């Protein structure tokens, strides 16, 4: 471990004699998590009434293709529209441009190579990407801790309250794999290798902006240490990372705007992506404002403001906790940047729980205290919450004229 808080190249990885052993253990934890999620999905499917996608009690394959899975399948079969749909008032309607192309594009490429269809390949790609992500997450955690704790951190991710999304036809698994890979490569200072990974990640989910912010945090930290560090060795180490981090920041920033630019080029409308995204909001995007409006609508303006203050204070308290600081500078910078990004651009709603999955480095913070003994309580609670998430949010229940709340 370097003295500036960034892992040295190579990290604390088990030796060659244990390589198969750790892989088998990580995959065993992952498979156990998927078996639990499968059982929960099957139980919820049996309880499912008629929905916009199927009749009552659909099969597993139909059930996991609910919600945004249908949009990804539409991209798989139709691609993206060159002309945006509009309502009677001229506002842009829901369309495929809100969903990034890497996941459906990968499934489509595999379909062309194998002749298999969406129903088979989409969940297979999701599960395979999630399995690979669990291995990379373990390697990332091993840069900061020992084997048992790193494995416990993987368990927290595999059994998380939203872990069922890792095996449905969503882009979350592929994004998790690319994000974990990018964080690992930056942690071991392989900045050049991280660049193409970041580009791919920014084409899987809208993560380019927060990742660019995280790289900016790391760049400023390296610049400060190089100029003001007390130890000459720290200054030299930090100085050697300033230029690579700057270049990675440029690539990350370019990747962040790539998809909106592609949407502009394909439709001829400069705001095609933004207008498509805000079609789900039903109102223009104003940074930070929804986080004040949402609690105010429930408990009133004064109490709503207190809720926001509580969220900010709570987030600061989390990042000051020793176990969170122990996850490392790079994962910590990512988590801080991602939370800032959500505060600025995310509209708090029922999908927020799923959107928190990229904060997976915090799983290590939950595994560290008391040698991981907290897991004996945490994992059963996570399984119960996962059932509630699937049964209440993934499963469809008519709640009003606009249908159900999305997962």
Image (cartoon, rainbow, N blue to C red):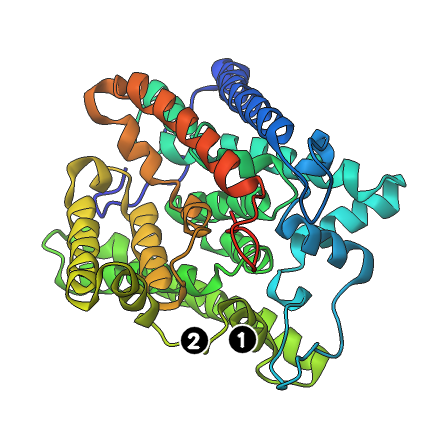
- Residue 277 location (% of width, % of height): 54, 69
* Vertical position of residue 231 compared to residue 79: above or below: above
The front one of 381 and 172 is 381
Q: Is residue 234 left or right of residue 355?
A: left
Residue at figure coordinates x 64%, y 33% from the top left:
128
Gap in angstroms between the C-alphas marked 2 and 1: 8 Å
Q: Residues within 10 Å of mark 2 (few under 14, many from 20)?
A: some
- Does residue 274 sit above or below 358 in this rendering? below
Q: Looking at the image, is 123 positioned above or below residue 99?
A: above
Rendered view: 116 above or below 253: above
Rendered-image quadrant of the N terminus: top left
Query: Dot 1: what SS?
Result: helix
Q: Nearer the viewer, residue 320 or 243?
A: 320
Disc 2 is placed on an element classified as loop
Query: Which residue is tagged 2?
Result: 285
Expressed as whole percent of the image width and height from the top left, the position of residue 54 reads 73, 42
Point out residue 235 in the picture as x, y percentages from the top left corner. Answer: 20, 56
Judge by depth and name the residue closer to the eye, 307 or 267.
Answer: 307
Asked if residue 11 shows in the view, the reply is no
**Dots 2 and 1: beta carbons under 8 Å?**
yes
Disc 1 designates what residue? Answer: 274
Nearer to us in this view, 147 or 131: 131
Residue visible at 62% across and 60% down in the picture: 100
Q: Residue furthest front?
A: 400
Q: In the rendering, which numbered label is found on residue 144?
A: none
């Amino acid at each position: 471990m370097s003295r500036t808080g960034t892992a040295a190249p190579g990290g604390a990885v088990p030796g060659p004699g244990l390589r198969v052993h750790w892989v088998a253990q990580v995959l065993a934890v992952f498979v156990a998590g998927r078996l639990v999620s499968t059982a929960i999905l099957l139980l919820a499917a049996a309880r499912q009434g008629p929905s916009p996608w199927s009749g009552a009690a659909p099969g597993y394959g139909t059930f996991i293709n609910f919600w945004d899975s249908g949009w990804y399948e539409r991209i798989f079969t139709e691609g993206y529209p060159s002309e945006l749909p509009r309502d009677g008032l001229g506002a842009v309607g829901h369309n495929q441009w809100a969903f990034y192309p890497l996941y459906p594009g990968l499934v489509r490429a595999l379909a062309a190579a194998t002749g298999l269809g969406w129903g088979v390949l989409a969940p297979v790609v999701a599960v395979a990407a999630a399995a690979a992500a669990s291995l990379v997450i373990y390697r990332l955690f091993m840069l900061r801790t020992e084997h048992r704790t790193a494995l416990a951190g993987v368990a927290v991710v595999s059994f998380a309250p939203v872990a069922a999304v890792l095996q449905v036809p969503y882009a979350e698994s592929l994004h998790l794999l690319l994000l974990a890979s990018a964080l690992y490569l930056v942690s071991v200072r392989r900045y050049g290798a991280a660049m193409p990974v970041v580009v791919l990640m920014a084409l899987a989910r809208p993560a380019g902006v927060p990742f660019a912010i995280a790289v900016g945090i790391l760049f400023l930290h390296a610049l400060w240490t190089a100029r003001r560090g007390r130890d000459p060795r720290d200054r030299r180490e930090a100085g050697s990372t300033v230029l690579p981090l700057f270049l990675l920041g440029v690539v990350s920033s370019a990747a962040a705007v790539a998809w909106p630019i592609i949407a502009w080029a394909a439709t001829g409308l400069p705001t095609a992506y933004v207008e498509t995204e805000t079609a789900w909001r039903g109102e223009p995007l104003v940074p930070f404002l929804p986080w004040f409006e949402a609690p105010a609508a429930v408990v009133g303006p004064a109490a709503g403001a207190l809720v926001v203050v509580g969220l900010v204070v709570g987030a600061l308290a989390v990042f000051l906790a020793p176990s969170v600081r122990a996850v490392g500078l790079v994962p910590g910078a990512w988590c801080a940047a991602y939370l800032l990004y959500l505060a600025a651009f995310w509209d708090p709603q029922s999908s927020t729980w799923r959107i928190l999955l990229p904060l997976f480095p915090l799983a290590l913070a939950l595994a560290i205290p008391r040698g991981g003994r907290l897991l004996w309580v945490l994992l059963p609670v996570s399984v119960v919450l996962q059932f509630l998430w699937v049964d209440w949010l993934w499963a469809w229940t008519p709640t009003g004229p606009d249908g159900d709340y999305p997962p």
